[in-house]
Image (tube, rainbow, N blue to C red):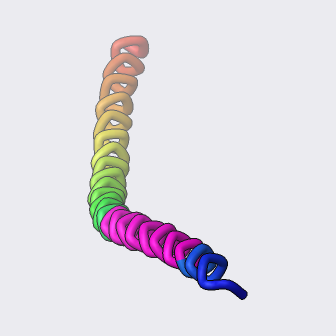
Amino acid sequence: MTNEELQRVMEFIIKRQETFAEGMVQAESRVTRLETAAVNLYNAMTDIGKAQKALTENVIQLAESQAHTDQRVNVLIDILEQRRNSKDQE
């Protein structure tokens, strides 16, 4: 191999190495962005989980309150029906 051919091969290898190095820098940048996005996603999912838990607790309390209200309304309906029936019998 002549000196000129050797020089061309070395230049080719150097250019390929530069391209590879640039690609590695870009890949590292992408990995860093992905890691940041993954942390942000994890934090968002944690917040959603907490909000879901709070919402579930509120729905349970609301259902219990609604059941209590239903019972009181039923008592009131019974009283009204008893009064109506007593008036009907008079």
Relative image position of residue 11 (x, y in whole percent): 53, 74
In percent of the image, x 45 and y 72: which residue is there?
Answer: 18
Front in this rendered view, residue 67 or 48: 48
Spot occupied by residue 76 in the image (x, y as percentages of width and height): 29, 32
Front-most of residues 32 and 3 = 3
Give the left or right position of residue 55, taking residue 18 as reference: left
Looking at the picture, how far across and down is residue 74, in whole percent? 37, 36
Main secondary structure type of the part rendered in magenta: helix
- Identify the image quadrant of the C terminus: top left
Q: Which residues are magenta?
A: 11-38
**Which of the 4 image quarters holds residue 57?**
bottom left
Residue in the image at 67% along x and 84% along y = 2
**Residue 57 appearing in the image:** no
Q: x and y percent of residue 86 in the render?
A: 36, 20
Nearer to us in this view, 40 or 9: 9
Q: Is residue 3 visible?
A: yes
Left or right for 11, reference 47: right
Q: Residue at x 58, y 72 (%)?
A: 12
Answer whether residue 12 is magenta in the image: yes
